[in-house]
């Protein structure tokens, strides 16, 4: 599966289900490199979890009133995320990691004031 134009690295969190031996062996047999030492339940460190939080806030502001409208808003907000916003989430990883270490394992949300969290 490996392609000369790109390299695929899958982030696997520490959840048992995510690291089942057979699933990992299958992915590796298809040419994926796995990042296995990621802590379980670490949404503050994951760029995609942070992206979903941004989308959720934007959708909440729009106040969907039914499931179909909710789904439409989610799709629209996903499409509206700029490359710059996505890159900023990836680039902010080191700062978020430092905050988690400084919080000694507590979540950033409970350890730091809102103004300090949003600065990341």
Image (cartoon, rainbow, N blue to C red):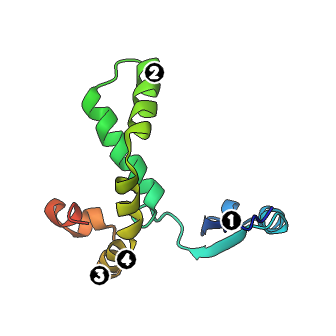
Name the residue beneath numbered marker 4: 94
> Sequence order check: which comes first, mark 1 or mark 4?
1
Image height check: is 25 above or below 83?
below
- Other residues around mark 3 within 10 Å, as few (<14) / some (14–19) / many (≥20): few
Secondary structure of the residue carrying numbered label 4: helix
> Sequence order check: which comes first, mark 2 or mark 3?
2
Q: Nearer the viewer, residue 94 or 45?
A: 94
Residue that appears at 36% across and 40% down: 56
Image height check: is 21 above or below 80?
below
Of the 4 image quadrants, the one containing the C terminus is: bottom left
- Other residues around mark 4 within 10 Å, as few (<14) / some (14–19) / many (≥20): few
Residue that appears at 85% across and 67% down: 29
State the image quarter where residue 104 is shown: bottom left
Of the 4 image quadrants, the one containing the N terminus is: bottom right
Look at discs 4 and 3 and give the one toward the viewer. Answer: 4
The label shown at residue 102 is 3
**Disc 2 vs disc 3: Cβ atoms closer than 8 Å?**
no
Name the residue beneath numbered marker 2: 67
Can you give x and y, in whole percent of width and height, for residue 33 in the image? Answer: 71, 72
Q: Nearer the viewer, residue 14 or 98?
A: 98
- Calculate the distance from the C-alpha at mark 1 to the C-alpha at mark 4: 26 Å
Secondary structure of the residue carrying numbered label 2: helix
Q: Does residue 35 appear left or right of residue 83 in this picture?
A: right
Name the residue beneath numbered marker 1: 5
Q: Does residue 82 appear left or right of residue 32 in this picture?
A: left
- Calculate the distance from the C-alpha at mark 2 to the C-alpha at mark 1: 40 Å
Look at discs 1 and 4 and give the one toward the viewer. Answer: 1
């Amino acid at each position: 599966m490996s392609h000369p134009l790109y390299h695929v690295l899958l982030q696997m969190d520490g959840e048992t289900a995510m690291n089942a031996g057979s699933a990992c062996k299958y992915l590796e047999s298809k040419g994926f490199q796995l990042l296995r030492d990621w802590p379980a339940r670490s949404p503050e460190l994951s760029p995609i979890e942070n992206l979903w939080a941004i989308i959720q806030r934007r959708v909440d502001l729009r106040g969907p009133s039914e499931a179909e409208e909710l789904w439409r808003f989610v799709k629209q907000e996903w499409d509206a995320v700029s490359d710059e916003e996505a890159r900023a989430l990836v680039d902010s990883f080191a700062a978020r990691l430092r905050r988690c270490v400084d919080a000694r394992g507590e979540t950033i949300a409970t350890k730091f004031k809102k103004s300090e969290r949003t600065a990341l």
